[in-house]
Amino acid sequence: MTETHPPQMNVESFNLDHRTVAAPYIRIADRKVLPAGDVLTKFDIRFTQPNVGHLDSEAVHSLEHLMAEHMRDHTDAVIDISPMGCRTGFYALLVGEHTPESFTPLLAETLEDILEATEVPAANEIQCGWGAHHSLTGAQEAARTYLAAREEWLQVDA
Ligand code: ZN
């Protein structure tokens, strides 16, 4: 493990020292002003501690489907929700100015919906690229654990 951080890179999260964060948390990963003045906000929703824990692949996949569908029940601002390849969390891209404080209730409502869900939406071969690779209970377990730590979401640094 290197002691010093590598040189500045293009991707915001590549410039984040993953050793010094304390998951679970919510962090703004990017904010972009488009040519016409519209603003995009990208959140880093970190479920597990980087390089210490990660979510099961099925749980990540099902959480992706569940969050993508249920968050849109509460807002029209969602452009995209995608899992991180390291399986420690998700990115959410939203239209408009948002803060971790304003995003917290939206994320909490979404995760509460997931605890009530009786199926993973679009978990089939017509609507998904790996329809068999899902776990509702795994997704709900991860959502429950993350929700239980809501008091810690705004505390990013260890
Ligand atoms: Zn899928």
Image: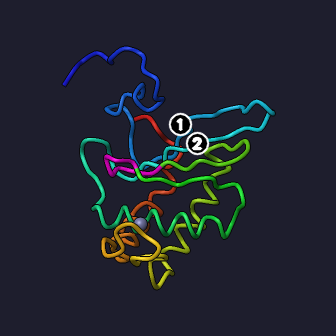
Identified at 64% across, 47% down, the residue is 101
The coloring applied to the image is rainbow
Q: Residues within 10 Å of mark 1 (few under 14, many from 20)?
A: some
42 drawn magenta: no
Q: Which of the 4 quarters of the picture holds residue 73?
A: bottom right
Residue type, label 2: Lys
Residue type, label 1: Ala
Q: Position of residue 111 (x, y in %)?
A: 52, 67
Identified at 49% across, 69% down, the residue is 66
Apparent side of residue 63 relative to residue 92 in the rendered image (left or right):
left
89 drawn magenta: yes
Which region shows up in magenta? 84-90
Identified at 70% across, 54% down, the residue is 77
Q: Position of residue 133 (x, y in %)?
A: 30, 71
148 vs 37: above or below: below
**The label number, if any, that marks residue 42 in the structure image:** 2
**The label number, if any, that marks residue 29 in the structure image:** 1
Q: Residues within 10 Å of mark 2 (few under 14, many from 20)?
A: many
Q: Quadrant of ligand 1?
A: bottom left
Residue extending farthest to the left is 1
Residue extending farthest to the bottom is 118
Residue extending farthest to the front is 126
Q: Quadrant of the N terminus?
A: top left
Q: Are marks 2 and 1 in contact (CB under 8 Å)?
A: yes
In terms of secondary structure, where does tag 1 sit?
strand
Apparent side of residue 67 relative to residue 96 in the rendered image (left or right):
left
Tell me the CA gap for discs 2 and 1.
5 Å
Apparent side of residue 27 relative to residue 140 in the rendered image (left or right):
right
